[in-house]
Image (spheres, rainbow, N blue to C red):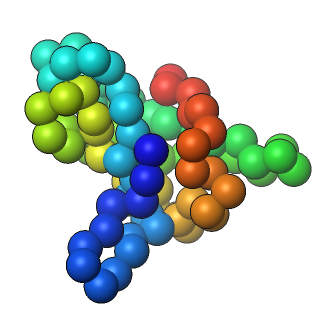
Amino acid sequence: MHFRQSRYRVNSHQMVLKAADSAEEAQKVIGKKVVWTSPAGTQIQGTISALHGRKGNVRVIFPEKGLPGQALGQKVKVL
């Protein structure tokens, strides 16, 4: 969906993703790995850390490097 951000700063190491239609369903995927594959074939892995709101969104943390802007709106794999 989008980067996690505040009023003046964008955190590219954290993303907010739509995981399910309700918070109860999204609770089941917390702790799982997420993989985004770039068009060049590079894979960036992260971990689902917490719920973000009550609509089924979750927060994903990418530890080694953040996601590029081209990742916005694309699908990721949940392992």
Residue 64, image x and y in percent? 52, 65
Can I make out residue 60 in this image? Answer: no
What's the residue at 57%, 43% (across, down)? 73
The residue drawn where x is 33% and y is 61% is 4
Left or right of residue 40: residue 14: left
Residue furthest to the right: 40
Is residue 31 depicted above or below 9 in this figure? Answer: above
Where is residue 40? Give x, y as percent.
87, 50
Q: Where's residue 42, x and y in %?
A: 77, 50
Residue at coordinates 19% horizontally, 29% vertically from top-left? 55
At 63% from the left edge and 63% from the top edge, which residue is drawn? 68
- Residue extending farthest bottom: 8
- Asked whether residue 4 is in view, the answer is yes
Give residue 56's position: percent from left, percent from top: 24, 27
Q: In which quarter of the image is the N terminus?
A: top left
| Count of marks overlaid on the render | 0
